Image (spheres, rainbow, N blue to C red):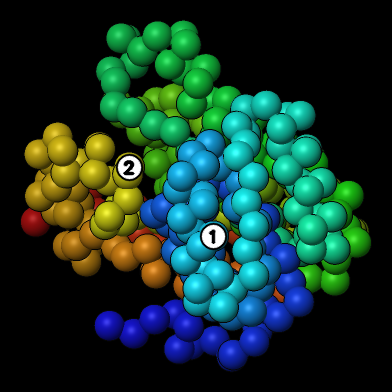
Amino acid sequence: MSSALEVFKTGLMDDRTVFITGGGSGIGRGICDILGGLGARIFIASRNPEKLRTAVQELDANGVTADFMTVDVRDYQQVEAAIGQCAKRFGGIDILINNAAGNFNCPTAELSPNGWKTVIDIDLNGTFFCCKAAYPHLKESEHARIISITTTLGRSGWPQAAHAGAAKAGIQSLTNALAVEWAPDGILVNSVSPGPIAGTVGVDKLYVKTGQEELMTSRVALRRFGRVEDIAGAVAFLCSPAGDYVTGAELVADGGRQWTFASAS
């Protein structure tokens, strides 16, 4: 199966620095592989030091310049410190990828205030914290991008995961607002909405381990889970010169799930 690296010009991201949250595994790691493979320097911020260390070692073995810092995106001071460390280490920041997320299935009537707050803090507040902290550095870049990983379920509502759906809806609203506010600074702000992606913690926890894999793929027009590379390729497009006139957009890469309903045959 072909890789997104085959689509883009070698060295496309040379001399650009990417700050990504939750990049130690899953979709985030795939984004690191693609953007790093195109020449970008990668700085990963996440809570799991073992995953981070392994990811950076593997990226380094593949010729990618990478570093990491253990960060809880719910803590603005930690986020600000990591952004500062990245800018100091690599001389600036060109691309911010908001990928850190939390979720779990729970009927809304049974959802605890703490459960609600935890997901909102990670997804929505964490995204805002990263955008705010990165802004002074991004406005100095000639290739500034902010890309947040969201979901179309933020628009439709997400039964059994209302907390995550509400957080993602907030992220999309923030994306649209910043696209206008920060356009004069040359910062392009977009989102990418994946469908169910194989091999990710979310799909394994929400669908595979709960026995809902067949049900979920039946709700995808292409009748299969996506690949991490599918989302990484969408991000690479938005980071490339082909995305120079795209801002305030939601790029959906969900295999047609948003248009396929439970009753579809």
10 Å neighbourhood of mark 1: few (<14), some, or many (≥20)? many
For the point 55% across and 70% down, the residue is: 60
Q: Nearer the viewer, mark 2 or mark 1?
A: 1
Q: Is residue 180 visible?
A: no
Q: Quadrant of the C terminus?
A: bottom left
Q: Residue at x 50, y 76 (%)?
A: 62
Q: Quadrant of residue 112?
A: top left
User: x, y (%) of residue 143?
Assistant: 78, 70
Q: Nearer the viewer, residue 243 or 260?
A: 243
Across and down, in percent, residue 6 comes to 45, 89
Residue at 25% x, 37% y: name it. Answer: 206
Give residue 8's quadrant in the image: bottom right
167 or 49: nearer the viewer: 49
Q: Which residue is mark 2?
A: 202
Secondary structure under the numbered disc 1 in the rendered image: helix
Mark 2 touches mark 1? (CB < 8 Å):
no
Q: Is residue 62 above or below residue 6?
A: above
Task: Locate residue 3 relative to residue 159 in the image: left or right.
Answer: right
57 sits left or right of 96 in the view: left
In this view, 261 is above or below 14: above
Instruction: Identify which amino acid the numbered label 2 is placed on.
Output: Gly
Q: Position of residue 176 (x, y in %)?
A: 68, 48
The kind of residue tagged 1 is: Val
Residue 59 lies, in percent from the top left, at 52, 68
* First of labels 2, 1 by sequence position: 1
Q: Which residue is mark 1?
A: 56
Q: Residues within 10 Å of mark 2 (few under 14, many from 20)?
A: some
The Cα atoms of the two marked residues, 2 and 1, are separated by 22 Å
